[in-house]
Image (cartoon, rainbow, N blue to C red):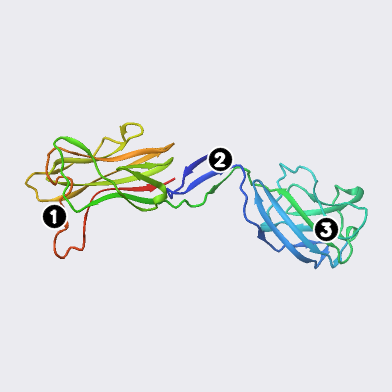
Amino acid sequence: MANSILSNNPTQLLTKAKVNVTDWTSYVPTTQGFVSPIINEARWRRVGDSMELKINLTTLANAAAEAQVSLPNGLVIDSNKVATTQAASFIIHDINNTNNYNTLITGGDSFINFSSGAAAFTPQNAATLFSANDVLDFTVLIPIQGWSSEAEFLAPLVQPKTAIVYETSTVSIPSLTNSIQTRELNNVSGDSDIVSLNGNQFTLSAGKYRLDYYGLGYQCGYSAVFIFDVTNNQYVSTEKFHVYLGPATDTQVAISDYDFIDISSDTVFELRQYTNLGVGSGLGNAGAFSSTNNPATTNRNSQVKITKLL
């Protein structure tokens, strides 16, 4: 791969590749010299700067005119790469004789020619070469004008995977004064194959990710949430949103933030939360879900949503 850039879709790559091979496509060729031949097979595909063409036909009658089979879609043979008439391939011919039958290509033409015997590089008439009911089969590779082997094309759409690691509780969780605490993470949902969870730490393999993370706060003063890179002993980012929840404020808030990370090997992370007031329920108040008509049975106190982009 020469290089890759993101297309307008952030999960899709625009890739420069040395060879761009397409699927086989059928077409109906026009012919000259062959009088109403039976086209048993006519298919083509792109291979980099060239077209691979596969033809199988049965002759019915042949005229005293140059034998030709057209290329699909008006495509033209590249005259920079085929400056003179060249033999392109042998033809499998069902008549047992001593002649070698060839396909010929010439730059600037939109068709292939045929030859045989001593005049191997001269296009010949169909009536000179073939008889009625001959079966011809050949595959030929033809450089095409305007095509390059280094073609840009969209790689298959990469569907991002998402997993959530989180902690739920039915009891209140205390905060500490002017301290950083590691939040508990003990459950995984979603695409669990992209993350492993062990002892409040989650491990991600090499790749690009978006992390959206949350921690509850209640009457804990100033508070912010962080992702800590345990493997490299550093915070992923330190420019944070801070929420102030005063000691007299009867409000519980999911404090949130997000980061983009690009890691080259397995890396271990933690979710951490800063609080500047020590409160018995500063990291989650169990009373929040105790109302009679509330269907919730637990508090989701902390969570990291992991989206693997590439």
* Closer to us: 281 or 116: 281
- Characterize the local packing of mark 1: few (<14), some (14-19) or many (20 or more) Cα atoms within 10 angstroms: few
Reply above or below: 247 against 234: below
Q: Residue at x 35, y 45 (%)?
A: 197
Tell me residue 58's x, y (percent).
Answer: 81, 65
Q: Which quarter of the figure is the N terminus placed in?
A: top right
Name the quadrant containing residue 61. bottom right
- Mark 1 and mark 3 lie on one chain; the one further toward the N terminus is 3
Q: Is residue 251 above or below residue 94?
A: above
Q: Which mark is residue 33?
A: none
Which residue is more in the foreground, 201 or 228? 201
Mark 3 closeness class: few <14, some 14–19, many ≥20 residues within 10 Å: many
Seen at 44% across and 52% down, the residue is 159
- Residue denoted by label 3: 67
- Marks 3,2: beta carbons within 8 A: no
Q: Which secondary structure, mark 3?
A: loop
Which mark is first along the chain, 2 or 3?
Answer: 2
At label 2, which amino acid type do we have?
Answer: Met
| Callout 1 amino acid | Gly
Quadrant in which residue 183 is drawn:
top left
Instruction: In the rendered structure, find residue 1 and report the number of the disc placed on it.
Output: 2
Q: CA distance from mark 1 to mark 2?
A: 56 Å
Horizontal and vertical percent position of residue 209: 38, 44
Name the residue at 72% across, 49% down. 142
Kind of residue at disc 3: Ala
